[in-house]
Amino acid sequence: MKRLFEIFFFLLMGIVVKAQDTIHSKNTDAVLYLPQKNIKGLIVGLGGSEGGNAWASNHWKSVRDQFLGKDYAFLAVAYFGSKNSPKLLEKIEIQDVYNTISIAKQKIHTDKIAIVGGSRGADLALLLGSYYPDISCIIALSASHAVFPGNTSHFSTSSWTFGGRELPFVPVNEAAVPFMIQRNIRKAFEAMLQDKEAESRSLIKVENAKASILLMSGNQDEICPSSDMSEKMIQRLKNSHFKYHYEHIQWQGGHTEPYKHFDRIFAFLQKYF
């Protein structure tokens, strides 16, 4: 009987059970998922302008589980549009998001942090990397190279703050208004970027990162000129003699095309994280 119990116990232990923990921190909602084996590092997942905690949803469960299966802990973070986070994507405090990451980092005792962000979440990933040297890998899907207005009805405030101060942003200009009325978002972005002075003032300082960087974009992006903006970041990294690995992969497709290529993300993490 004792022998049967031991066999049953070991069979039960063989079932893959992925533990999770809720992280409580100011202005965010986050869930930390833990792999069964020794942790190789922390992956932070940031959603885009849809809000809420996209990476904690069933939609991304299969991809999330792939990270866990590769022995990464996974932190899904909501930074707006959830119970305890700001209602709108407006003046989001970057330090609040980092504090949540820092708590998770301490819980699992790792110094390796990679951030995977899509769309506005990609912008946030790049911003976090530009401010915090312990971010060691950035994967930005359909990213912007500069800061843009928050998603409000008036578009007069920045999407992001740091230390309580709004980051400079590319404003909505007169040239962009007709395209916004037509809901031609890409053309609106392109019109806004005609303001070269504002663009220069609002650049995300990717060259300050201490991380390997993977940019992926769709060359037919209908939301924003993400391929062009990614190429601008690549050029700035080249000009600054950036010492960490960086690359930009352009796919045939639209704004969501990069999300279909997680095999390349896993390969990048294996080699450069």
Image (spheres, rainbow, N blue to C red):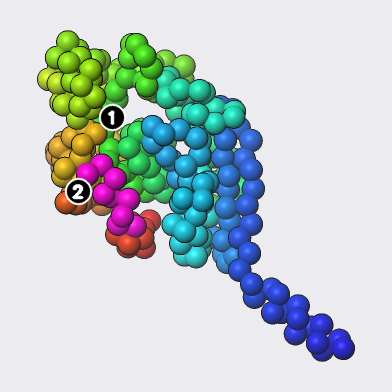
Residue 162, horizontal then vertical, whole percent: 43, 22
Amino acid type indicated by mark 1:
Ile
Secondary structure of the residue carrying numbered label 1: loop
Placement of 10 over or under 79, stated as above or below: below
Rendered-image quadrant of the C terminus: bottom left
Which residue is drawn at the image coordinates 50% and 39% (left, top)? Answer: 53
Q: Is residue 253 above or below residue 236?
A: below
Q: Position of residue 255 (x, y in %)?
A: 25, 42
Residue under circle 2? Answer: 253
Q: Is residue 33 magenta?
A: no
Q: Residue at x 24, y 24 (%)?
A: 183
Figure check: 251 above or below 132:
below
Front position in the image: 260 or 131:
260
Q: Which residues are magenta?
A: 253-262
Q: Residue furthest front?
A: 182
- Label at residue 136: none
